[in-house]
Image (spheres, grey):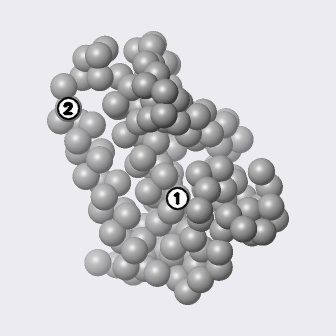
């Protein structure tokens, strides 16, 4: 979906909300702490992958809030990240892949092969770090 399509009903323009953006940054940090503290076994791989997507979603939503947008679509979150966050194409593809996997986990009870996380966790972490840095730039020093 392109950005113009998103603006036709899946994204609304609103007043920038820095409090919401800061709250979402804080929640993303909590999820990161949860992933670090969680028992990391193959059995919990789907939950870790799901949590990584939720972190990215919260960070993108926070950036959107700071910029004065509200998305009603996960696809449009990814479109926003592609258009306004300066992420390399590979990271945008990875975010969309995480979105699809998260949907499979949440709506179909799908499992995730642990090798997926082994292959992608470093790049997922780098993508999250880049999104976090972008969001922090939009927030006043606290």
Whether residue 121 can be seen here: no
Quick one: quadrant of the C terminus? Answer: bottom left
The percent position of residue 124, horizontal first and vertical second, equals 48, 36
Q: Is residue 5 left or right of residue 76?
A: right
**In the depicted structure, whether residue 60 falls above or below residue 64:** above
Q: Which residue is mark 1?
A: 60
| Badge 2 vs badge 1, beta-carbon distance below 8 Å | no
Q: Residue at x 72, y 68 (%)?
A: 9
Q: Quadrant of residue 122?
A: top left
Q: Which residue is mark 2?
A: 38
Q: Mark 2 falls on what kind of element?
A: loop
The percent position of residue 95, horizontal first and vertical second, equals 58, 41
Q: Mark 1 falls on what kind of element?
A: helix
Q: 67 and 9: which one is in front?
A: 9
Q: Quadrant of residue 42?
A: top left
Q: Quadrant of residue 112?
A: top left
Q: Is residue 8 left or right of residue 13?
A: right
The CA span between labels 2 and 1 is: 24 Å
Q: Which circle's residue, 2 or 1, is located before the other in the chain? A: 2
Numbered marks: total: 2
Q: 31 and 126: which one is in front?
A: 31
Q: 15 and 129: which one is in front?
A: 15
**In the depicted structure, whether residue 6 falls above or below residue 112:** below
């Amino acid at each position: 979906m392109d950005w113009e399509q998103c603006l036709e009903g899946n994204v609304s323009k609103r007043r920038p909300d820095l409090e919401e953006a800061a709250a979402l940054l804080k929640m993303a940090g909590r999820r990161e702490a949860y992933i670090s503290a969680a028992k990391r076994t193959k059995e919990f791989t789907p939950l870790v992958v799901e949590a990584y997507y939720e972190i990215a979603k919260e960070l993108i939503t926070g950036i959107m809030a700071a910029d004065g947008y509200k998305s009603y679509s996960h696809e449009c979150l990814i479109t926003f990240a592609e258009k306004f966050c300066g992420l390399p194409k590979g990271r945008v593809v990875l975010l969309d892949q995480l979105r699809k996997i998260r949907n499979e986990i949440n709506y179909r009870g799908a499992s995730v092969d642990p090798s997926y996380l082994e292959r992608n966790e470093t790049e997922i972490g780098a993508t999250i770090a880049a999104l976090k840095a972008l969001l922090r730039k939009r927030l006043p020093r606290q």
